[in-house]
Image (cartoon, helix red, strand yellow):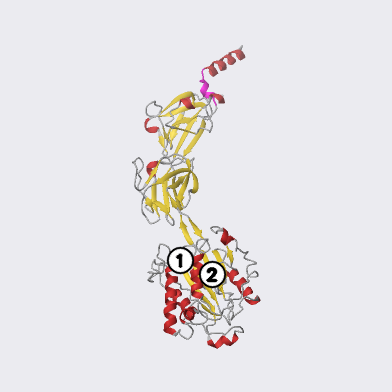
Amino acid sequence: MKNKLLMMAMILLFSACAKEEFAVNKGSQNTSLSALDSTANKLCAQSTLISPKVDILLLWDNSSSFSLVNSSTKASMNSLISSIPERFDYHILSVPLVSQNANTLYEAQLVAKNPIGLTSAAMGILKDKATAAQSLNFTTSNQSAEPGINRATQVIEANRGNGIFRNEAYTIVVMISNEDDDTCELETGYGECGTTTWKAKVDAQINKLLCMRGNSYANCSGTGYSNSNSLNSLMMRFINISQIKSSTKGLCTNGVGAVNQRYKYVADSLYKAEYTNGMNRANDHLNPMDALSFDSYDLCTVGFNHIFDGLQTSITESILKHKYDYWPVTGSSTSIDPSTIRVVRSDGKILANRTGESNPSDGYTFDNVSATRNTRFYPTPGESFTGKMIQLHGVDGNDKIVYPNCLTVTFNAEKTTYGYVYLQYGEPNTSTIEVRINGSLVPQSATNGWDYMGLQYTAALDQGYKVANMPSGTTSGYFIRLNGNYKIQNTSSNTINVLYNSKNSN
């Protein structure tokens, strides 16, 4: 009987205890919310290096006084061709100095980096770079007189239309002769060409070459040239390989070994000639034989192997500046607060935000939409980007970006407000719920605190607020709602701590 009474007392004692007093300890879930990020991206406009066009005319002495093409000169030509850098877009035309035919391309040969722009007439004389020198062969003329300066002018004039000599190229004439220009003698008669007479005629020829070059201070009246139909050469040179020093003329085993004056005069004059468009005149001082002249080599003592070594320093690659009307901000998945975007050019200029304005004339606009666009519009559309971009307005360089400018775009991530907390342990015993934000207790209140929502589909929640602690892909669950002043923005770091007993734990 005594044992039965003890058993009944224990049953009554346990039944008097609340169920919660025997539940497991409260579960705790902690959620850390990071402050929004601030991002700064610096990108720079790009450019393209353009191979400089280099058009070279080699005039080989084929007069009766001198047999120039031989194994030695062929070897020198190989060296000359090899010395021209592959970064140059070169055309090398070899022709006989004394014309044998009205066709200026008679017995001529052409070596070209690529055939773009050449007509069929030019393609017909195209030779491979490796074999060009060996195929060099000119008929020896039956005359010894050489109107070399006029020959250079005529060959260039006759071969502009076929693509051999191009506008806006480095135009280089290389005269290879063991004598001198005889234009004065052919026109006036031998014995009639003193220094004053030949200089007057050569000056007229130099004047025409400068007018053909373009951007010259020469008087071009009567030459047939003006800046509108000139070559507009980036540089024109006349390189003279001839007998230029009397002390070496005995070393020339062929020909009369006449000391050269007129070709040397042309070479020196073109080297020193100024340009009206601000182009720098030649400054590589290609004068290995005479400190008082330029671009002249002594045929009797020097090969052609290195005649372009100095000249290369005067030939520069041009830069094609890219231009942009769109500029990357961030990738597609990044959220942005548009009001925080700041765009600064490399010179310190801050571009104005013209978003929402109709037909802005400067600054930028931002539509906060991810897309794939070409950011560059010149020289061709390109540099595609996928993500969020600003559109640049204005003119090239102000505020459309042109190389070498850079833009630094800074922005903050989108401000978000947390209004819900997902309960990761399932359905709670509501009387056990305790909510703390940054360690401070949050009251239970439907207006300014927290309240329990029960089981909800995520689609039924206010989409204007984010849910703390919710796993990706969740479609339903148990939630508490944050109300009033207890909604949390990501403008600073915060911690939400929720303690509760889950019914699933009993």
Q: Are marks 2 and 1 in contact (CB under 8 Å)?
A: no
Residues shaded magenta: 16-23
Task: Look at mark 1 in the image and give the residue it sits on.
Answer: 234
Query: Tag 2, which secondary structure?
Result: strand
Q: Nearer the viewer, residue 24 or 331?
A: 331
Q: Quadrant of residue 438?
A: top left
Foreground disc of the pair 2, 1: 2
Badge 2 crowding class, 10 Å Cα cut-off, few under 14, some 14 to 19, many 20 or more, is many
Within the magenta stretch, is there residue 301? no
Q: Whole-Å distance between the Cαs marked 2 and 1?
A: 16 Å
Residue 28 visible, this angle: yes
Q: Determine the secondary structure under disc 1.
A: loop
Give the numbered dot on residue 378: none
What's the residue type where badge 2 is placed? Leu
Circle 2 residue: 57
Where's the C terminus, which quadrant? top right
* In the foreground, 100 or 8: 100
The residue drawn where x is 48% and y is 23% is: 454
Q: Quadrant of residue 270?
A: bottom left
Total marks shown come to: 2
Answer left or right for 456 relative to 219: right
Q: Quadrant of the N terminus?
A: top right
Horizontal and vertical percent position of residue 42: 45, 52
Percent across and percent down for residue 435 are 45, 31
In the picture shown, does residue 198 fall above or below 215?
Answer: below
| Amino acid type, residue under disc 1 in the picture | Leu
> Which comes before the other along the chain, label 2 or label 1?
2
Q: Position of residue 95 (x, y in %)?
A: 57, 70
Mark 1 crowdedness (10 Å alpha carbons): few <14, some 14-19, many ≥20: many
320 up-or-down from 453: above or below: below
